[in-house]
Image (cartoon, rainbow, N blue to C red):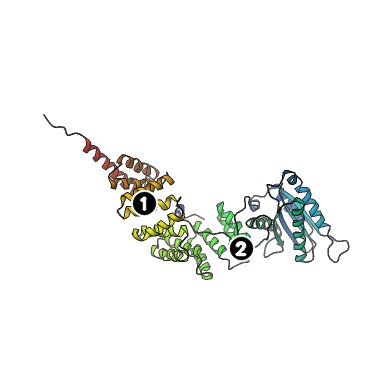
Amino acid sequence: MKMSLKFSSKEIHFLRTESDQDLAGPPEFYFSDLAVSPSVPLENFMQRLGEADIPDDKFLCAVLKVPFDLAEEELEKSSQIFEACFQSLLDKPVSGGATAHIRGIWENLDETAFILAFWDYNQTDTASDLLNALKEKISKDLKTDVLMGAAWFPFAEFRRTQVPANALKAIDHAAFFGPGHTVYFDAVSLNISGDRLYQHGLYEAAIQEYQTGLELNPGNINLLNSLGVCFGVSGELNLAMDTFKKALALSSAEIMVIYNIGLIHQIREADDKALVYFKKAHAVNPDLFEVELTLGQLLLKTGKPGQALPYIEAACQLNPESGIAVRTMAEIFLELKDPDRAGVEFNKAVKLIPSDGAALSGYAQAMLEQGKNLKIALTFAQKALGLDPDNEVFKQRAAAVSSACEQAEQNKAPNIKSA
């Protein structure tokens, strides 16, 4: 899918959010990356699992991880402790059978992480209890919190070979809650996995994750929004709009969805419709940087600098380090015929983003309108033009500043009278 050129601008992007409101933060290491590029240990495990004789084709797969900062001596014996604890699980007799026991396999993913699968249990509750007991015993023996993600088979329409990847996605999900947590693979796990693929630019794979997540939970607003965002950055604007509208029908006050619908309208150059949605988003939450910035920029673009000013002021307060917001503030003052204030703001913008051609050109224009520092203004105007030689505004400003510099030099030259 070809990406629309409209998305090449750093100033235009879709609004996204965490995959779950209760999540505390992303993991340092994403195990789901192994689902994209399997390691040798994971491939070994998957081969063994594929060859295993599993009655009723029913098993539970899990990934467990101990902290990296575990004491060195504890870290060295973690594998031995895991093996001993897992063996104790396998020694458990199957309910109703005198000689039958739980069976399973495991593999080291690295020195701190292990993947396992076991079967021959009668009830899922029994399997969950066994897995929790395993986690608690390892935590006790290593005197640390163990993170765990788990996945069932059968589950939904997933194939047996997909279950280890689901467990990897589940432990990424668990990591968002912090050490010691356990998560069973679900739709949110797929949202997190899709977001990770999105971050790597693997949009088609991300779309598949979001769509699979929606099969598990059709009413998940975050999944719908994430899917719409992925369609949008892939240039599929019609699909993006349809997806956002589905989300809006489920929750009419979801700010990220409202904003993203407005952004689609803006990209399609339907500015009046875009303004309606951006103002709705502002009404839901006036403290969101992206909303205030985009609304202010669009009001400026449509010839309403006075109306744009309070939104851009709010954006600058919400993110004082945003060179784009500060530059937009300066552009507003240029439109309001206040070159002094414009110059102050352009100066800030250039310091924040020295390679911002719009800020450099705007600063040159502000100095021209103030009638001072024309040589510096010419340097800035030429630098901006060098960054974007085809920009007509930059060309006009550079020509105007150059002409003013020449005129200033002529005015300084002494008059030579004929004899």
Q: Position of residue 410 (x, y in %)?
A: 22, 37
- Rendered location of residue 210, percent (x, y): 58, 61
Residue furthest to the right in view is: 98
**Quarter holding residue 413:** top left
* Residue at 40% in and 60% down: 269
Q: Could you tell whether 174 is left or right of 97 in the image?
A: left
Quickly name the residue at label 2.
213
Residue 211: in sight, yes or no? Answer: yes
Image point (17%, 34%), residue name: 415
**73 is higher (above) or lower (below) than 10:** above
Position of the C terminus by quadrant: top left
Q: Amino acid at mark 2?
A: Gly
* Residue count near mark 1 (Cα–Cα under 10 Å), binned few <14, some 14–19, many ≥20: many
The residue lying toward the viewer, choosing from 392 and 29, is 29
At mark 2, the secondary structure is helix
Residue 356 x, y percent position in the rendering: 41, 46
Please name whichever residue, 157 or 253, is drawn nearer the observer in this view of the structure. 253
Indicate which disc residue 330 carries: 1
Horizontal side of residue 238 vs 30, given as left or right: left
Task: Give the side of residue 184 with respect to residue 204, left or right.
Answer: right
Q: Amino acid at mark 1?
A: Ala
Q: Secondary structure at mark 1?
A: helix
How packed mark 2 is, by other alpha carbons closer than 10 Å (few <14, some 14-19, many 20 or more), is many
Residue 58 shows in the view: no
Circles 1 and 2 in contact, beta carbons < 8 Å = no
Mark sitting on residue 7: none
Instruction: Tell me what residue is drawn at x 61 percent, y 63 percent.
Output: 213
List x then y, in percent, for residue 42. 71, 50
Give the mark nearer the N terminus: 1 vs 2.
Answer: 2
